[in-house]
């Protein structure tokens, strides 16, 4: 399967420099998407092959995480900005839907009052916009910071935003909101606990939509500007890329996706509380990306599926097996393996970064960056204390000329090196 | 309006403002020690050692086991107290220093040539591993740390000062002084400064880069270990999650002072300690929003003055 996929990538790359239709070669749609359509068909018939509907419930939660991982991948994978507070946008999306659909708020004296309500379908785009706007507002002053500082500032936002929702009385403080109205449309009900199919197909539709949007973004001139910034900020700026604007777009579009995920999650769970939103969510999504392959769409999807699988099945089942077996239960004493989830997450992060930093399904351009192929000034990293990005300036500068001006003589060589994988 | 006369006449424990200042200074001493570890490591390899807070936390869980092993439950006095304190400080420092050097060797050293964010992600992973092992060992809730230090003290300007607070401050200042002497006057200290300034040139001058970096992690870890001992006695409980929260606050302190600058870390530690204890007292529901206040400060500093109070603006290397 993987080999077939990689072959289609090579075909794409060959046609890249020759035929371009609306910025994308036709074969790109046909070749790369054959596998995608296969998986989509699989996902469409998946619930009908089951007798047990619990798998559908798991699939919905996986789908929501896939959405979030795809959104964070724009920020981390494409633009190379480490965002450790992605949960902030998730919160904004969730609260927009919660407040909008229920119409309940609380004043500072603890009295409940109502505002006009709207349907989930109206609020979904509003939640996405609210999160995006918020992302731009957060990003505008902070995106000038260096990468590692940005990581900590975003981590700060991830902590502040939920605690503000817990602090101010309007959103029912720590209690949060529950019994949110379901997004029913005519005869299709989303509130039947025995029938999760409507939510399953809603999630699937949103995932497909986000995949299409993200793939289109990746191959736009904006996407190439992100890659240029990721590889070398200084060279990108020197090639005429507006750093703050480009980063802001990555941050904002990532936030929009996070907002969609939050809105969907609130509608699905029908309840939200500030304590549901913490650093664990931000980091779980980051681990999905690192595991699957930073910057690679199929990688990120696989990462989300694998991590949820480990979380839901592996740890639970192993823990049960260990506890029911008297010998192993005695051996472990009172240790509860369910707590070891983050130990496994931590080990995954460290091992992936050390042994396979490109992830399970790599983005080949990213792999080249990590392997250091194409580094023009090897000497710069001889002692090894300088950031690796610094030695790639020459190559990126050339690439970049190609990406920003399609008509220039660099266009062929530039986009040839882009790679349309992942 | 606080005048000296009203302060002196404040009586026993009646002046909340001065009391919060006193608490802030004590807390600040702990933050400063942890912040030094962040700043030393950042200064030399430009890595935010995300696991540093958990290195600190491991000192607290290990010395808790030692104290529980001895079976002490009530305050000690005389030589027994001095002996136990010395033992705990040595154990705490050795545990954290060893752990920090080990983590650097296995998780960060192979990534020196990797893109900048790679070691940061590895550090996050290490942080999760250290936290979860401590959680599996000591449970998910806080564990009480026995009161081994006498709880008596005295009043000054209307604020209660425990002898423990004095001990914390004296120990922290002594360690900071020792660090300063080490960095400024020893051969290894000079090597550390050289590597921080220009690793290539330092290597060409015969400085052993790996050993120097290991020593930096050793010192940073030892300071965090000592901070773990005094914080356990001060806070009266040990919790696996302390490292994450306190680590972020200490990192904020390091950034506030100007990351890479040891004097800045100390200043930042005390300033953040004061801000936090005053915020808890004077902002309504301060304990809910206390962390958010510290983060808001962090964001503001980074946006308005990324070089910190005492740091220098460093141009981007090309």
Image (cartoon, grey):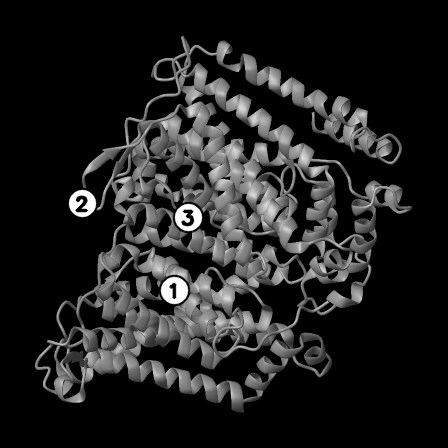
The mark found on residue B249 in the picture is: 1
Q: Residue at left 14%, top 67%?
A: B73
Q: Nearer the viewer, residue A43 or B253?
A: B253
Categorize mark 1 by other alpha carbons within 10 Å: few (<14), some (14-19), many (20+): many
Labels 3 and 2: the sequence-earlier one: 2
Asked if residue B258 lies left or right of residue A404, the reply is: left
Q: Which residue is mark 3?
A: A279
Q: Is residue A281 above or below residue A390?
A: above
Which residue shows up at 34% across the image and 55% down it? B241
Marks 3 and 2, how far apart at CA: 31 Å
Q: Residue A109, labelled with which disc?
A: 2
> Is B3 left, or right, of A272 in this rendering?
left
Q: Nearer the viewer, mark 1 or mark 2?
A: 2
Separation of residues labelled 1 and 2 (CA atoms): 33 Å
Residues marked 3 and 1, same chain: no
Image quarter where the N terminus of chain B lies is bottom left
Q: Is residue A289 above or below residue A179?
A: below
Pick out the residue farthest to the right: A409
């Amino acid at each position: 399967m993987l080999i077939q996929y990689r072959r289609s990538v090579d075909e794409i790359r060959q046609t890249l420099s020759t035929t371009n239709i609306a910025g994308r070669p036709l074969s790109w749609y046909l070749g790369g998407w054959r596998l995608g359509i296969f998986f989509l068909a699989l996902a469409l018939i998946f619930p009908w092959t089951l007798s047990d509907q619990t798998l559908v419930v798991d699939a919905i939660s996986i789908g929501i995480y896939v959405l979030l991982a795809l959104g964070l991948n724009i920020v981390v994978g494409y633009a190379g900005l480490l965002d450790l507070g992605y949960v902030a946008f998730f919160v904004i999306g969730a609260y927009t839907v919660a407040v909008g659909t229920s119409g309940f708020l609380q004043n500072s004296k603890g009295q409940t009052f109502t505002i006009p309500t709207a349907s989930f379908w109206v609020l979904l785009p509003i939640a996405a916009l609210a999160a995006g706007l918020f992302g731009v507002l957060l990003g505008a002053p902070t995106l000038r910071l260096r990468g590692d500082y940005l990581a900590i500032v975003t981590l700060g936002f991830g902590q502040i935003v939920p605690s503000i929702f817990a602090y101010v009385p309007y959103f029912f403080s720590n209690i949060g909101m529950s019994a949110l109205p379901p997004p029913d449309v005519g005869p299709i009900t989303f509130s039947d606990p025995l029938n999760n199919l409507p939510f399953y197909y809603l999630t699937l539709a949103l995932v497909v939509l986000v995949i299409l949007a993200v793939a289109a973004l990746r191959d736009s001139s904006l996407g190439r500007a992100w890659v240029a910034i990721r590889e070398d900020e200084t060279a990108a700026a020197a090639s005429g890329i507006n750093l703050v604007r480009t980063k802001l777009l990555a941050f904002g579009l990532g936030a929009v996706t996070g907002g969609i995920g939050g809105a969907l999650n609130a509608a699905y769970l029908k309840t939200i509380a500030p304590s549901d939103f913490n650093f664990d969510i931000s980091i779980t999504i980051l681990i999905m990306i690192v595991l699957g392959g930073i910057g690679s769409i199929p990688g990120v999807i696989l990462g989300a599926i694998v991590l949820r699988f480990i979380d839901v099945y592996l740890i639970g089942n192993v823990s049960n097996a260990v506890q029911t077996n008297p010998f192993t239960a005695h051996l472990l004493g009172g240790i509860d393996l369910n707590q070891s989830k983050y130990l496994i997450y931590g080990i995954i992060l460290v091992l992936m970064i050390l042994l396979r930093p490109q992830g399970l399904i790599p983005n080949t351009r990213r792999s080249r960056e990590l392997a250091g192929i194409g580094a023009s000034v090897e000497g710069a990293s001889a002692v090894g204390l300088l950031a690796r990005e610094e030695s790639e300036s020459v190559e990126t500068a050339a690439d970049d000329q190609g990406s920003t001006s399609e008509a220039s003589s660099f266009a062929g060589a530039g986009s040839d090196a882009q790679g349309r994988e992942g | 309006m606080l005048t000296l006369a009203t302060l002196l006449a404040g009586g026993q424990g009646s002046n909340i403002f001065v009391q919060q200042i006193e608490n802030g200074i004590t807390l600040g001493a702990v933050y400063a020690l942890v912040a030094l570890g962040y700043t030393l490591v950042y200064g030399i390899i430009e890595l935010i050692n995300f696991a540093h807070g958990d290195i600190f936390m491991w000192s607290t869980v290990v010395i808790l086991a030692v104290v529980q092993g001895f079976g002490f439950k009530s305050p000690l006095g005389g030589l027994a107290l001095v002996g136990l304190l010395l033992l705990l400080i040595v154990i705490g420092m050795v545990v954290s220093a060893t752990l920090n050097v080990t983590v650097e060797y296995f998780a960060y050293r192979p990534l020196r040539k990797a893109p900048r964010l790679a070691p940061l992600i590895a550090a996050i992973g290490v942080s999760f591993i250290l936290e979860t092992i401590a959680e599996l060992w000591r449970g998910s809730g806080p564990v009480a740390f026995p009161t081994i230090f006498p709880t008596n003290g005295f009043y000054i300007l209307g604020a209660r000062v425990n002898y423990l607070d004095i001990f914390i401050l004296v120990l922290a200042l002594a360690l900071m002084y020792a660090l300063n002497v080490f960095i400024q006057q020893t051969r290894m200290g000079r090597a550390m400064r050289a590597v921080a300034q220009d690793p290539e040139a330092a290597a060409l001058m015969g400085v052993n880069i790996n050993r120097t970096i290991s020593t930096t992690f050793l010192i940073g870890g030892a300071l965090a270990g000592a901070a773990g001992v005094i914080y356990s006695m001060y806070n009266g409980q040990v919790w696996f999650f302390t490292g994450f929260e306190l680590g972020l606050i200490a990192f904020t302190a390091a950034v506030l002072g100007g990351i890479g600058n040891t004097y800045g870390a100390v200043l930042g530690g005390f300033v953040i300690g004061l801000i936090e204890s005053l915020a808890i007292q004077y902002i309504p529901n301060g304990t809910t929003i206390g962390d958010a206040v510290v983060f808001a400060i962090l964001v503001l500093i980074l946006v308005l003055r990324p070089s910190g109070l005492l740091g220098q603006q460093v141009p981007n290397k090309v």
